[in-house]
């Protein structure tokens, strides 16, 4: 990933937080037919240090579950806040007009060898923990145990588990750090006015801009 110095995020806790806050990852692997990508929720476990392990599952008929080349690292992409940045937000537009549109975004790329498993207990553990993660906070959270056991067993036979010990992490947070302070203030206020409050908050966090 191309990461200019001002956008680099190399703090492991910050990258882990972004991974955990991301509901869906893009998993890319190499197969005999070329690159294959799937969009899957993944769990992050802290061990082994320093980067941890990703776990999840794929549908058994998915070609990625059968044909990933174990000799080539898998890549899991986690995307955070993102959005279009209008030149109209910038104070520089009013001063010189020398501005162009851009896109702000934050992402983490996790690389590592991929392993597949189909042990029923291990699959049930992954499915249960994914469910608990995403049901947390609901007034009446659904649990895997709410479904009939024979139904759950049948569903588990239709998936393949994936495990990726993370060998490398790359983080990029492109949130107008390269713009003058007045432009960053304009970005924050412009995004808020356009209803993109989450992205405005991300710019504030990344740059310390008050606006």
Image: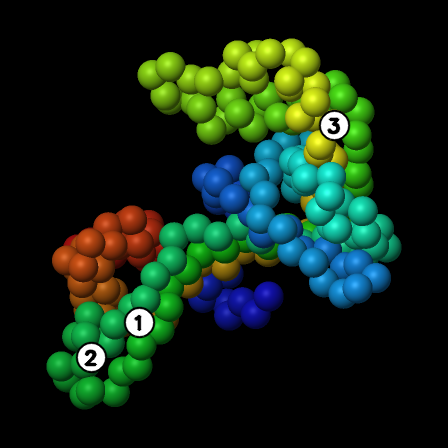
Mark 2 touches mark 1? (CB < 8 Å)? yes
Q: Secondary structure at mark 3?
A: loop
Image spot of residue 76 (x, y percent): 63, 51
Counting the numbered discs, the total is 3
Residue 196: name its quadrant.
bottom left
Q: Residues within 10 Å of mark 3 (few under 14, many from 20)?
A: some
Image spot of residue 85 (x, y percent): 29, 68
Give whichever of 11, 77 is nearer the camera: 77
Specify which label sits upstream in the sequence, 2 or 3: 2
- Tag 2 residue: 92
Can residue 84 be seen? yes
Q: Indicate the quadrant containing the C terminus: top left, top right, bottom left or bottom right.
A: bottom left
Q: Residues within 10 Å of mark 2 (few under 14, many from 20)?
A: some
Q: Secondary structure at mark 1?
A: loop
Give whichever of 114, 12 is nearer the camera: 114
Left or right of 33 in this view: 104 = left
Could you give the CA–CA distance between mark 2 and mark 3, rounded to whole angstroms? 59 Å
- Tag 3 residue: 157
Q: Which residue is at 44% across, 24% downward?
A: 135
Specify which label sits upstream in the sequence, 1 or 3: 3
Q: Which residue is at 18% across, 59% downward?
A: 194
- Tag 1 residue: 179
Left or right of 190 in this view: 80 = right
Q: Which residue is at 31% across, 71% downward?
A: 179
Image spot of residue 72 (x, y percent): 81, 57
């Amino acid at each position: 990933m191309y990461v200019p110095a001002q956008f680099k995020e190399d703090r492991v806790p910050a990258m882990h937080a972004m991974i955990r806050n991301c509901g869906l990852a893009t998993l890319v692997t190499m197969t005999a037919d070329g690159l294959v990508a799937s969009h899957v929720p993944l769990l992050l476990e802290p061990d082994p240090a320093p980067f941890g392990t990703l776990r999840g599952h794929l549908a058994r008929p998915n070609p990625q579950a059968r044909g990933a080349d174990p000799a080539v690292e898998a890549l899991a992409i986690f995307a955070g806040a993102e959005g279009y940045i209008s030149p109209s937000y910038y104070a520089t537009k009013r001063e010189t007009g020398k501005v162009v549109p851009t896109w702000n975004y934050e992402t983490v790329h996790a690389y590592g060898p991929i392993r597949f498993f189909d042990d029923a207990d291990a699959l049930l553990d992954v499915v249960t923990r994914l469910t608990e993660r995403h049901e947390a906070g609901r007034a009446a959270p659904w649990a895997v145990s709410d479904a009939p056991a024979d139904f759950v067993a049948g569903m588990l036979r239709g998936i393949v588990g994936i495990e990726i010990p993370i060998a490398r992490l790359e983080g990029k947070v492109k949130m107008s750090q390269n713009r003058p302070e007045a432009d960053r203030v304009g970005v924050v206020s412009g995004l808020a006015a356009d209803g993109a409050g989450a992205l405005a908050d991300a710019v504030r966090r990344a740059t310390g801009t008050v606006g």
